[in-house]
Amino acid sequence: MRASVQRSKSGCPDHGQPNSKIEEHTFVSAQWKRTHTCGELRASDVAQTVTLNGWVHRRRDHGGVVFIDLRDRYGITQVVIDPQTMQADQGAVASVRNEFVLSLTGAVQTRPDGTRNPNLPTGDVEVHAAGMRILSVTKTPPFDLNNPDLEVDEAIRLRYRYLDLRRAEMQQNMALRHRLIKAVRDYMDAEGFWEIETPILLKSTPEGARDYLVPSRVHGGNFYALPQSPQQLKQLLMVSGMDRYFQIARCFRDEDPRADRQPEFTQLDIEMAFVERDDVMDVIERLYLQLADTLSDKTVQTRPIPRIPFAEAMEKYGCDTPDLRFGLELVDVSDLAQNTEFRVFKDVVAKGGIVKGVRAPGCGDYSRKQVDEFTTLARSLGAKGLVSIAVDDEGLRSPVLQHLGEAAASRIAGALEAEPGDLALIVADQPDVTNAVLARLRLEIGDRLGLRDPNTLAFCWLVDFPLFEWDEDESRWSFVHNPFCGPFPEDEDLVESDPGSARSLQYDLVCNGWEIGGGSVRAHKRDLLEKIWLTMGFTPDQIDEQIGHMLEAFSFGVPPHGGIAMGLDRTIAIFADEDSIRQVIAFPKNQQAVDLMTQAPSPVSDAQLEEVHLALRAKREE
RNA sequence: GGUCCCGUGGUGUAGUUGGCCUAACACACGGCCCUGUCAAGGCUGAGAUCGCCGGUUCGAAUCCGGUCGGGACCGCCA
């Protein structure tokens, strides 16, 4: 539980408070209203009298002439203030500082030879000010807004997010986000989809992520839940005959945030009637290729988007979100490993584990310390250790060479296709741990060797997922995807006879190692759905309670249907070269799910609690 | 719930094998000078008891413990 959230120190130096006496002007007279934006004046506009409104990006005061770079969303224009020709109060001009909001009027002129600025679209011209009005003064900003290279602590940026959003990088990200969502809407419309809104206040569903709850005032003791996704509603819209639905939907999940996860996030939510797997995938594939072509300078690595069966992805990459921008596939060496004298390997294989490895090209000369970094990473993900084998022209070097034996080590290195100069990294553990660790090590190698080309979009579809996975904690089968995902038609009998072998009609779209979307063709037949839920250990009564309303709806004539949900924040982050979706969300929350700007979540009054019939069990702090 | 990393003027960093730190540098900020800059320039000034609390020590920004804040990850995320 969060104790008291510290407001960082007041932040802004206000030495001498020079601004307190400066007159600010109300924006009443049309005379001071902009005629142009700060990004549009060109040589062809010379001789026009214009008025610009904007923020002072930078000010260069030469004692006589003063240059002001005025900035708005559209760009930056240089304004020259010459005391000889300027009608305004010189004191006001001298008082201007960065981030003041100004109205400046004057004539557009060609810049003198040799003073043009090729780095600015407006750099051929400048406005010679005839008048100036200060619309708003400012305190000194808590961090530099005009230095694109400066990396300011994210907590400070989030506290003053409205200032952070003035920076060019964030303006570009917001522009990209707007254009991408606009392109999505245009595309969906052209494809015959209807955008239909669904409720934000709905019923809590116990499966899945933790719900955000909203207490009901009218119905004491009862709660709405915010949607984790509009899953059930969009399926019901199929029953309603809407045929093709989409929504730019806000979704809410009360789980710990990450770089690629926020408590609330935005999905392109889609559902289609009378479709098979390929129909949904085709709609999304064409959309994403179009988005990549029109909104990104990056190159799509492979068209059409390759499809990778889940089992193959786990085998080659150790995860279901492979980064295909580079090779370095994992290799299973369990057979070789179990025939060595190395007890660690033999025991793991004997207990159902696997031994796999990955090649780190050119890392054969890594120091003990560098190899230890790999080991630390492996241990942090649950591995008990990491076996490294360095290959050079002399032979092999490995901490476990004598346990493994020269010949066996050589065979394993050979299986990994390690050449002189390479380092082979091998993990032996239960399959999930081995794969998770090596998947991460593979990415780490890719990062270190610069193999994750930021100019490439390596899309792939993950298909042929299992329908169920075994839940160790609860000793029962559970969903891999969602409660309505359908099995392969030929696998329907396996739902009862061999649940672990039933394949699902799920598909995930992956790009550069990020899962950017997933969906499925649904199980729309009542008996099949009931069978699936029975397999997962629900009693008929429980099934009725959980999805009775869906089964009832399906009893009134349901079209075969399927859909998908695309993570737009992640999509935009990849397009914008950002490591975190916070960079493409205007007002995100931090890793503790706190909004550092508004300090939400926050206590509410006793009266508010009373109204919604709540009493707190623990006295809140502070 | 857990592992790891980080915390020094407004911002970003240096200093962190304890002592020459009376804490340095750049930007920002205040004052003065300067009529063609575009990261303008010159001179000058103010600003941090080193997140907080406690401990070790003759001596702590530096070592130890705790705590708060931030980040990456694991768990969690149908």
Image: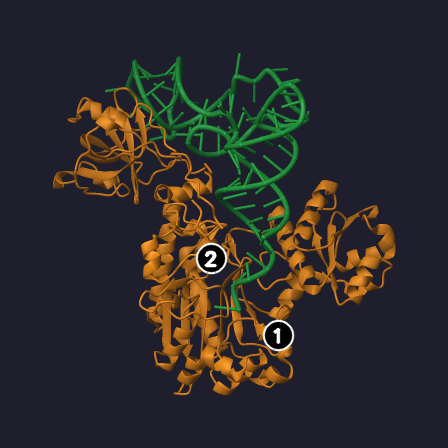
Chain colours: A orange, B green
Q: Rounded to the nearest whole Å, what is the CA distance between mark 2 and mark 1?
A: 32 Å
x and y percent of residue A72 in the render?
A: 29, 42
x and y percent of residue A353 in the render?
A: 74, 65
Q: Nearer the viewer, residue A614 or A54?
A: A614
x and y percent of residue A299 in the render?
A: 49, 56
A78 shown above or below A431: above
In which quadrant is the C terminus of chain A drawn?
Answer: top left
Crowd band around label 2 with a 10 angstrom C-alpha radius: few (<14), some (14–19), many (20+): many
Residue A337 visible at all: no
Q: Is residue B48 left or right of residue A45?
A: right
Q: In this figure, which residue is indicated by the disc labeled 1? A: A476
Chain at numbered mark 1? A
Residue at 39 percent of width and 67 percent of height: A223
Which SS class for mark 1? strand
Q: Is residue A125 left or right of residue A319?
A: left
Q: Is residue A76 left or right of residue A210?
A: left
Amino acid tagged 2: Arg
Residue at 46 percent of width and 49 percent of height: A590
Residue at 40 percent of width and 83 percent of height: A553
Crowd band around label 1 with a 10 angstrom C-alpha radius: few (<14), some (14–19), many (20+): some
For marks 2 and 1, give the one nearer the viewer. Answer: 1
Chain at numbered mark 2? A
Q: Nearer the viewer, residue A311 or A114?
A: A311
Circle on res. A570: 2
Q: Is residue A131 left or right of residue A492?
A: left
Same chain for the residues under marks 2 and 1 in the image: yes
Residue A332 visible at all: yes
Disc 2 or 1, which lies upstream in sequence?
1
How many labels, in total?
2
